[in-house]
Image: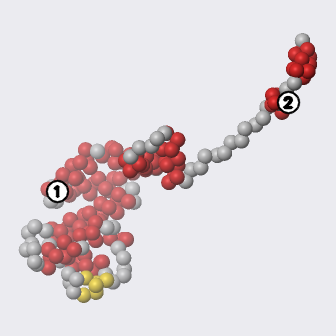
Amino acid sequence: MNQFDKKSLPYRSLKNHWRLFQKDSRKLSLNPFYSKTFRQTLTPHEVIEKTLTFSEELANAYKLYQLLLFHFQEERVDEFFDLIQENLKDVNHYFQTVFRTFLEHKQYIKNALETDYSNAKLEASNKLFKDIKRFGFGFRNFINFRKRVFIPLNIQKEKTYPVLSRSQLFFNPLQLTKSRLFNCCCACD
């Protein structure tokens, strides 16, 4: 991007439509919109095609990125790492840094792609607790903090009703008289 003049069409196209290059090409919208950069109505696919004509290096990098993204989303581990190793020497130095990092952590990435286990829900809950603590400033007691955590999680505390034991059903201390107390003590002997 820095190789283009700031007032040129390629620079403005990359500057205004950089988000389209980060998206999966299969998920781009088919709805046309008016692009101020190109001064015409285009679909996101057409914007990308026109922008890629400005630089062959960018076009090759975009195709490689889309292939890697496809293999990653389809959980094709071998193809993903084969593609990285094939293109390690041919790509931009920014890509090389990322590729080397991927190769260093190959077993972890492979494990993440092959297994269905994830701690995403746990991490989301931890983030929620930390956000509440940060935004809540302070709570007078732990019960209020706990209630504040349960509200966004939509967790309600189950109400428990005390169960009266047999001794409470038959023996009411308010109705205790001397004769009943005496009878209870004598009956126990």
**Residue 172, placed above or below residue 65:** above
In this image, 166 relative to 32: left or right?
right
In this image, 76 relative to 180: left or right?
left
Look at label 1 and name its amino acid.
Answer: Tyr
In this image, 166 relative to 130: left or right?
right
* 29 and 174: which is toward the camera: 174
Residue pictured at 81% horizontal, 30% vertical: 174
Q: Going by the picture, which residue comes out furthest to the top? A: 189
Q: Quadrant of the N terminus?
A: bottom left
Q: Residues within 10 Å of mark 1 (few under 14, many from 20)?
A: few
Residue pictured at 35% horizontal, 57% vertical: 72
On the image, the x and y values in percent for residue 166 come to 83, 30
Residue pictured at 24% horizontal, 87% vertical: 40
Q: Where, by quadrant of the figure, is residue 46 drawn?
A: bottom left
Q: Secondary structure at mark 2?
A: helix
Q: Quadrant of the C terminus?
A: top right
